[in-house]
Structures are given as structure tokens and as C-alpha cells.
Amino acid sequence: MKKNSVSQSVIRRLPRYFRYLSELSERGITRISSKELSSMMKITASQIRQDLNCFGGFGQQGYGYNIEALLSEIKTILGADRRNTAIIIGMGNIGSALAKNMNFKKRGVFLIGLFDVSADKIGKQYGDLEVKSSDELETFCRENHPDIAILSLPKTLTQPMAKLLYSYGVKAFWNFASTEIDIDGASVENVHMGDSLMLLCYDIANRKG
């Protein structure tokens, strides 16, 4: 089945499969059944089989799934087997936390640039990368062609910055501002942490017993 014929709900579950399978691999586990994976992930074994069968199915009856092979297939499906490059714009709390703690390479993304407008941020070192002035963005993007811009900016600056970066050739945006960006022709993932928190509040309010 072609990837573009698979529902977005299935696609959005794949990173979760990847996360659980990665944890199993790191523990030295080589295979797992849909029933065992179901117990870990709290979704039905039938749902797991249906999701994976959208891409041809990777399990063997009586054996289960080879974890390394399944991880490799999911990385390919998600495009994480490519060398996707990313830059972070805005090195405040969220930007700096991502630069320090996010395992980008594990997910097929290579961080190549950090940018901010503040003099107290410019020049700071995060691993092998030094924070550059946002004045250098155009030259950097024209020379290095980053695939993804990670935006951690005040919401009033986010859409204008995204449009500017798009004009520099950046075509995908991971947006942590408390606003949504919308650019024709670009891939955008708007992250709303407040939405997740409110869903947790709903769950507390409606918990039986």
C-alpha cells in the first residue's frame, strides 16, 4: 500500500511504535509479539497488526516481530533514514532544552545551527554548535540548505520568521510558539503543550471513582 493512502491516524502512531521498540532494542530484546507490544502500549494487538499491515506487515505467526527489522522499516516509512538537517531559532528555555537534551540523530535529524537575537545568547556553546546571530540566517540557509526550522519564538514573531525562512529555502517547521503558523507549500507541525495539559485536566475531572 502506498504511504499516501494510509490514514494520518496510523502515521501518527508510528513514532510511538518506534519509541517503544527502541527501548526494547536498547534492553537487548530481539523480538516481540503483537500481544506483548499491546500490553506495553495499552492499545489492542489487533490495532497494532492493522497499523503495520498498512505497510505490508512485518510479523511472522508464532514468532512475532523482529525488533531491529521493524525499527528499520518504520524509520524508512517515516523518512528518518534520510539525513534531515535542522536549525533552532530562539535559544530561550525551550530552544536550549531541545539543543541539550533532544536525541535528534536517533530520529534521522542532524542539528546544524542555532540562532538568537540576544547578545547574551549569541556565542554560547551547545555541544559542537555555537549560537549565531539571527542576522546570519539568510547566508547560513543559502549555504547549508536546512530541511527543518525549529521555532521557539514569541508568537508575534513566529509567522513572519517562518515566512522569511521559507523564502530562504526552508520547507518544514516544528513550531513551539503558542500560535499556529500556516505557509502554503510548507510542512508544519504546531506543538501545543498547553493543549496536552488541558487534556490531562479533562481526564482528572472525568475520572470515575
Image (cartoon, rainbow, N blue to C red):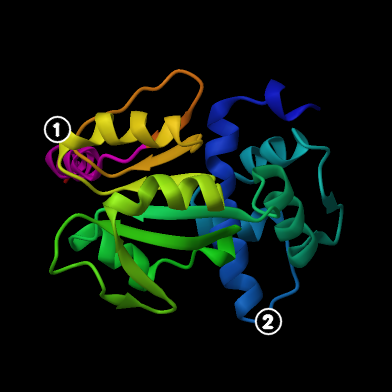
Which residue does the image show at 13% across and 69% down from the upper left?
A: 120
User: From the viewer's perspective, is 157 left or right of 20?
Assistant: left
Can you give x and y, in whole percent of width and height, for residue 171 in the image? 51, 34
Can you give x and y, in whole percent of width and height, for residue 150 in the image? 37, 48
Residue furthest to the top: 184
**The magenta segment:** 190-208
Q: Is residue 182 above or below residue 86?
A: above
Q: Of residues 163 and 27, which is closer to you in this image? A: 163
Q: Is residue 50 visible?
A: yes
**Which circle's residue, 2 or 1, is located before the other in the chain?**
2
Q: State which mark lies toward you, 2 or 1.
A: 1
Going by the numbered disc 1, the residue's amino acid type is Thr
* Distance between mark 2 and mark 1 Cα atoms: 47 Å
Residue 191 magenta-highlighted: yes
Can you give x and y, in whole percent of width and height, for residue 140 in the image? 45, 53
Q: Is residue 103 above or below residue 74?
A: below
The secondary structure that most of the magenta stretch takes on is helix
Going by the numbered disc 2, the residue's amino acid type is Gly
Which residue does the image show at 71% across and 43% down from the upper left?
A: 77
Which residue does the image show at 59% across and 36% down from the upper left?
A: 11
Callout 2 secondary element = loop
Can you give x and y, in whole percent of width and height, for residue 40 in the image? 53, 60
Q: Is residue 116 above or below residue 9?
A: below
Please identify the quarter of the rendering in which residue 35 is found. bottom right
Q: Of residues 204 and 193, which is closer to you in this image? A: 193
In which quadrant of the rendered image does the N terminus lie?
top right
Q: Which residue is mark 2?
A: 28
Q: Which residue is mark 1?
A: 156
Q: Is residue 188 visible?
A: no
Which residue does the image show at 72% across and 30% down from the upper left?
A: 3
Q: Of residues 76 and 207, which is closer to you in this image? A: 76
User: From the viewer's perspective, is 185 left or right of 7?
Assistant: left
